Amino acid sequence: MPANLPPEYLEAEEEFRQADSKDEKVNALQRMLSLLPNHKGTDKIEADIRRRISKLKKSSAKKKGPTRAKTPDQIESQGVGQVVLSGMPNTGKSALLDILTNANPNVADFPFSTYGPTIGMMDYEDVQIQLIDTPPLSEEHVENWVFNLIRKVDLVTLLVDGSVDEPLKQYAKSLDLLADEGIYLFPPEADFKIDEIGRTNRRGLAVLTKDDEPTAEGVCGRLEQEADLPVAPVSILEEDTLKEFAKLVFESLEKIRVYTKKPGEEPDLHEPYLLDRGSTVIEAVRSIHRDLVKELDYVRIWGSGRFDGQEVAQDHVLEDGDIIEIHDK
């Protein structure tokens, strides 16, 4: 049976041939997949495209060990978003990075053992989040690149040591050190983009480390009462807290995952499309391929609709995990 491939598909195929980087190749293959006609004549082509996408992504994920930036504050963002681990000395930043990612930071029980940024990718279900360990905040001296990096990332996790005598004072001091550099942290859902000139506002998350220590008992509750940020208690010895940390980091990035399915077929749950929280159906369709909007007839949804498979309006706001089925004219 002939494939009858449209011109747009052939253009995407040429983009794949001309692509230099793995990301460009994956994007071209995903576009080919979205433009592929749905009939028996294209089954083998679809299987081959999916195999190549999977192979390219696996080859990228196989990289081991820490990734060093060309310059400390210029780090290419990967995955769902870029998250910095910040805090005062010995708050457990390197240990957290070590257990959550494929990086291999210098973990030591003495302060200032981290000299430069160390990067790792943290798994959260079917996506990855970039974590960056940095030298600690300190009244003595902090390299300028540390603050420059904090100003650029999508989320700042501010680590507080649950085993110290006064963790709440440590939290407040960390905020003061950031404020001295014009950096202010807000809850992830806050509308903080418009502010005074000279300020840098970022999404923030308070992380109470060493939560398994006896001295940490009750600290989380007190921190939740006093902190303006969401609080994540975590222990590198307790897997449940690590999973909750990854979940809260993903939610704090204000992103959602949307999946697609072809009419009459099972949904593709391997390749989610990442969108900003609050995105609508039409924005999701445009993110898959802008040309799909021109021929769009209607969309069915599984997940946040009242009934699975119901037709929804183009301005319907999507939620994390929604599955959409696109019908063209």
Image: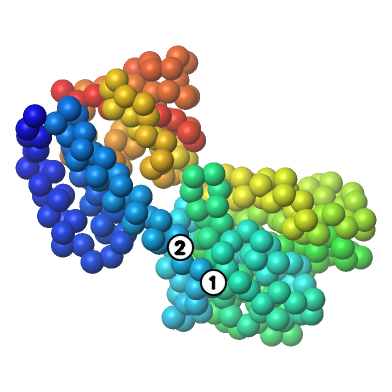
Q: Which residue is mark 1?
A: 65
Q: Nearer the viewer, residue 165 or 4?
A: 4
Question: With respect to residue 127, does 118 lie above or below?
Answer: below
Which label number is shown at residue 62?
A: 2
Callout 1 environment at 10 Å: few (<14), some (14 to 19), or many (20+)?
some
- Give the amino acid at mark 1: Gly
Would residue 93 be found to the left or right of residue 222 on screen? left
- Give the amino acid at mark 2: Lys
Residue at the image point whose x is 62% and y is 50% from the top: 246
Callout 2 environment at 10 Å: few (<14), some (14 to 19), or many (20+)?
few
Regarding residue 305, the answer to whether it shows in the image is: yes
Residue at the image point whose x is 45% and y is 14% from the top: 307
Give the secondary structure at mark 1.
loop
Would residue 169 be found to the left or right of residue 299 on screen? right
Give the secondary structure at mark 2.
loop
Residue at the image point whose x is 88% and y is 66% from the top: 164
Q: Quadrant of the N terminus?
A: top left
Regarding residue 150, the answer to whether it shows in the image is: no
Estimate the spatial distance between the alpha carbons at disc 1 and disc 2, rounded to whole Å: 10 Å
Would residue 81 be found to the left or right of residue 42 on screen? right
Task: Find residue 319 and report its horizontal and vertical position in percent.
Answer: 48, 32
- Colour basis: rainbow
Residue at the image point whose x is 52% and y is 55% from the top: 129
Question: With respect to residue 100, does 248 lie above or below?
Answer: above
Which label number is shown at residue 252?
A: none
Asked whether the beta carbons under mark 1 and mark 2 sit within 8 Å of each other, the answer is no
Figure quadrant of residue 166: bottom right
Task: Find residue 13 and report its horizontal and vertical position in percent.
Answer: 15, 51
Q: Nearer the viewer, residue 90 or 262?
A: 262
Task: Find residue 279 and report its horizontal and vertical position in percent.
Answer: 41, 37
Task: Find residue 189 and report its horizontal and vertical position in percent.
Answer: 57, 44
